[in-house]
Image (cartoon, rainbow, N blue to C red):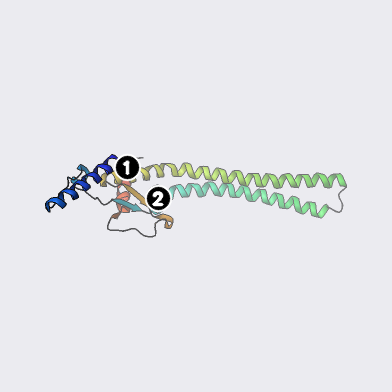
């Protein structure tokens, strides 16, 4: 506020003096205006994180291990479903002949088998998710380290993930595709 008031006073005084002498008036410039302004283009890198991740040497091995684990669980899930189908068919065939107590017992068994099957499938999904995270964690750590190293070495402000169409346009004159640089850096990082 004081600066604005002071600037208005200077302008008023200058116009009064200028009106008296008819000479041009030069006003003092503030210190901030005297410094040269340097506009620096932001530098950034970009890559498709998922594409680089899937091209890593350990990725195929991790996916193979995950597929083997999934196959074992799929076999057990299929066995549980076959058991449930068999129980259900037996229930339908004997439904007319069963006394009320046996029919209620079989209905309860069917209900429990169905609930156990759903519970097992949910557990399998959780276990597969955890297994995937454990298998991918060292790869993600390595990739993140490589990206950080490239970013620091190249002096970037940021490296952008262009995957999933998150950035439909990137000005390639201010940014740089760092995919190859990151892949090269991954090869130098020890696990």
Q: CA distance from mark 2 to mark 1?
A: 14 Å
Q: Residue furthest bottom?
A: 169
Q: Which residue carries the number 1 mark?
A: 189
Give the residue drawn at x 63%, y 51%: 78
Give the residue drawn at x 16%, y 52%: 19
Q: Residues within 10 Å of mark 2 (few under 14, many from 20)?
A: some
CB contact under 8 Å: marks 2 and 1: no
Name the spot of residue 108 as percent of width and height, x first.
78, 44
Dot 2 falls on a residue whose secondary structure is helix
Q: Nearer the viewer, residue 85 or 104?
A: 104
In the rendered image, which quarter contains the N terminus? top left
Q: Is residue 173 left or right of residue 93?
A: left
Name the spot of residue 11 as percent of width and height, x first.
21, 48
Q: Which residue carries the number 2 mark?
A: 53
Q: Residues within 10 Å of mark 1 (few under 14, many from 20)?
A: few
Ranked by sequence position, the earlier of labels 2 and 1 is: 2
Q: Quadrant of residue 144?
A: top left
Name the spot of residue 55 as percent of width and height, x first.
38, 52
The label shown at residue 129 is: none
In the rendered image, which quarter contains the C terminus? top left
Q: Quadrant of residue 146?
A: top left
Give the residue drawn at x 36%, y 60%: 169
Dot 1 falls on a residue whose secondary structure is loop
Q: Nearer the viewer, residue 170 or 18?
A: 18
Q: Is residue 186 left or right of residue 135?
A: left
Name the spot of residue 46 as percent of width and height, x first.
34, 53
Q: Nearer the viewer, residue 47 or 86?
A: 47
Q: Residue furthest front?
A: 20
């Amino acid at each position: 506020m004081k600066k604005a008031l002071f600037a208005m006073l200077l302008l008023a005084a200058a116009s009064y003096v200028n009106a008296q002498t008819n000479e041009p008036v030069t006003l003092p410039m503030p210190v901030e205006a005297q410094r040269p302004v340097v506009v620096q283009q932001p530098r950034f890198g970009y890559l498709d994180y998922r594409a680089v991740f899937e091209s890593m040497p350990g990725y195929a091995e991790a996916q193979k291990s995950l597929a083997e684990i999934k196959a074992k669980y799929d076999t057990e899930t299929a066995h549980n479903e076959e058991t449930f189908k068999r129980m259900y068919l037996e229930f339908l065939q004997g439904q007319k002949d069963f006394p009320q107590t046996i029919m209620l017992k079989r209905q309860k068994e069917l209900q429990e088998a169905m609930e156990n099957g759903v519970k097992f499938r949910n557990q399998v999904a959780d276990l597969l998710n955890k297994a995937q995270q454990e298998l991918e964690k060292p790869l993600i750590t390595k990739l993140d380290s490589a990206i950080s190293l490239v970013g620091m070495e190249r002096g970037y402000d940021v490296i952008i993930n262009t995957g999933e169409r998150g950035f439909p346009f990137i000005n390639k004159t201010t940014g740089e595709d760092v995919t190859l640089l990151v892949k090269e850096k991954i090869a130098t990082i020890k696990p």
